[in-house]
Image (cartoon, coloured by chain):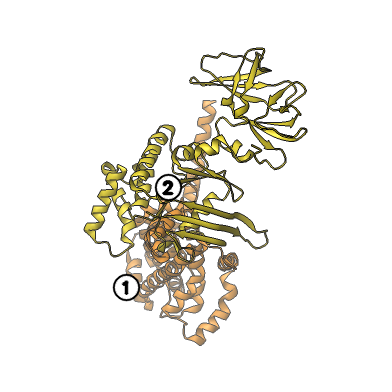
Amino acid sequence: MTELELRELRKTYRARGRPPVDAVRGIDLTLRSGELLGLLGPSGCGKSTTLRMIAGLETVTGGDILVGGSSVVSRPAQQRNIGVAFENYALYPPLTVAENLAFGLKARKRADRGDVARKVREIADRVDLTTILDAHPAGLSSGQKQRVSLARALIREPDVLLLDEPLSHLDAAQRDTTRRELKRIQRDLGHTTILVTHDQEEALSLADRIAVMKDGMIQQLGTPYEIYDTPANVFVADFVGEPAINLLPAVTTADGHARLSDTARLALPVPLAAGREVMLGIRPEDLSLAGEEEGLPARVVAHEPLLESGIATVTLPGVDNPLAVLTAPEVRLAHDDRVHITADPGLTHVFDAETGDSLR
Amino acid sequence: MTMRKRLLGWLADAALILYFLFALFPIAWMVILSLKPTNELFSTYFSFSPTLDGYRTVLGDSEGIPFVRFFVNSLVVSLGAVALSLLVGLPAAYASARWRFKGSENLMFTLLSFRFAPELTVIIPLFVLYQKLGLFDTYVGMVWVLQLVTLPLTVWIMRSYFADLTPELEQAALLDGYTRKQAFVRVALPLVKPGVAAVSLLAFIFAWNNFVFPLILTSNEAQTVTVGALSFLGGDRPKYNLTAAAALVSVVPPLLLALTIQRYLVRGLSFGAVKS
């Protein structure tokens, strides 16, 4: 279908009497036709501003947006043919679902009535809305509203589809089904899609590639596995992963280890010069309980049994930060228990303490 | 404990009843006054032979006072003022709710200041201007000057209604290919209907009740009921029963209006207070 390209895209907000705010500071992205890209980041990272600039709801300070190879920055939102499913669904309360869907088509005068009805039926079929076409938005569940919102964005056959936090207002059960639906519909129709979210689970499960954003810049762009397995810096490592990665300041030693405290040492995944200050990153699932001979002695602070696995919080002697360790379901631990833990050096991440960049 | 609570409840009820009587008393007094025949006007007793003569006189245009015309004038001028305020005020309120532009806050404050500047401070220059411009004692002149009262009201109340609407609805319409104007007329406006109803009623009441402007800026052709009702006090001796009848007749339109749009009104007037 259509390729989407962002070149050096920037947005600066200027308000009188206040210093200018750089919301987006030069984003380069190319989406292949039909690709679903997740724009993931904490609130205020510029992801929504980026989305609004693509849609034409926000002016562009610098750079270019190309849809199917031609620049759209000078065109108003009405002439861009970009579909947006808004976070709050943006359904028109006085109209029924069918009327809401038709409303989007009627702006373009050329669509005749039979055509509108046919398209409404088609999209309702696709997005599974046929049973609620006559309902009003107020009577729908959040999941249904989200599907209507999606259908409304899709009915015009947009070149690019933008999803703004599509699952954030759904409860856990609806989230799972809606997520699967979203993925299926996007695959079926093949729209080039950007998904904006602060929820890593949403991005990891839906996106072909993820761009992790912070402070208006892309920190890392890659497949979900690349983002998870080889985070480019401390921020990405910390932001992606649940429970969050353990981050431990350490100093490298001459024999290829990192010293956490006088007694605690861990093997480094890569050789580094001795005496360098680093930040170790170890995911809770890459730590394991071990026998007395091999592991580091640790003390249990708390253990949360989560049925399919557990999370133990432990402290190492002389190390300030407590560590989270994912435990097997049969493990039973109590406060003050003594355990030993080991880390797989191959799965340990090491970052520069100063810049936060990965040293792997 | 419950005893005390019940006692407090009774006290509160008693206080409310007292206030109710206090508030209703002038109206009851006027009703009594309007039903009195002229010769019993100054008797202080509640027993009198009630008559509708007062109303007949007032509505029959006798005594040389064209009260029916004043009434029609009031209707025309008030409805005209409301219509103009909506026509100008709705887009203005929408714009001020959606966009910050240079001086937008100053502009809004200026509009508001029309409401707290006493009308009497501007009435003399206005009188001179109206004489010169030929607006004195005309419908156009009255509708225009009433904008000082109704327009700030309309803009400020409607602004908060528009501000409470999520802009995403209009943005979705824009993405669908609607123009900015269509998004306003077809998306935003229908959603603030309760607000439009409430503000229309308020503006109508303010316009209808206005006294100073018609007093100074009209003489006969465009005079309204507020000033017209006082005409019955002039002459050789004040006819209080006719004044009371005239005043009660002039309460009818705002009352009817309030009753017809009551459905919207409760929602409209409490709109800002109860956020969804």
Q: Residue furthest bottom?
A: B132
Q: Residue furthest left?
A: A114
Q: Relative to residue A52, is residue A110 depicted above or below?
A: below
Of helix, strand and loop, which one carries label 2? loop
Protein chain holding label 1:
B
Left or right of A276, for residue B274:
left
Q: Which mark is residue B60?
A: 1
Q: Image point 37% across, 47% down: which residue?
A: A150
Residue A53, given in percent of the width and then of the height, sits at 50, 57
Q: Image point 38% across, 42% down: which residue?
A: A182
Chain B appears what colour?
A: orange
Chain A appears what colour?
A: yellow
- Kind of residue at disc 1: Gly
Protein chain holding label 2:
A
- Kind of residue at disc 2: Glu
Of helix, strand and loop, which one carries label 1? loop
Q: Image point 35% across, 59% down: which residue?
A: B256
Q: Nearer the viewer, mark 1 or mark 2?
A: 2
Left or right of A353, for residue A347:
left
Q: Are marks 1 and 2 on the same chain?
A: no
Q: Quadrant of residue B179?
A: bottom left
Image quadrant occupied by the C terminus of chain A? top right
Residue A267, given in percent of the width and then of the height, sits at 68, 26
Please name the residue that numbered disc 2 is placed on.
A35
Left or right of A316, for residue A152:
left
Q: CA distance from mark 1 to mark 2?
A: 81 Å
Residue A277, given in percent of the width and then of the height, sits at 75, 35
Q: Residue B100 versus residue A328: which sits nearer the camera?
A: A328
- Count every numbered label the image shows and give the total: 2
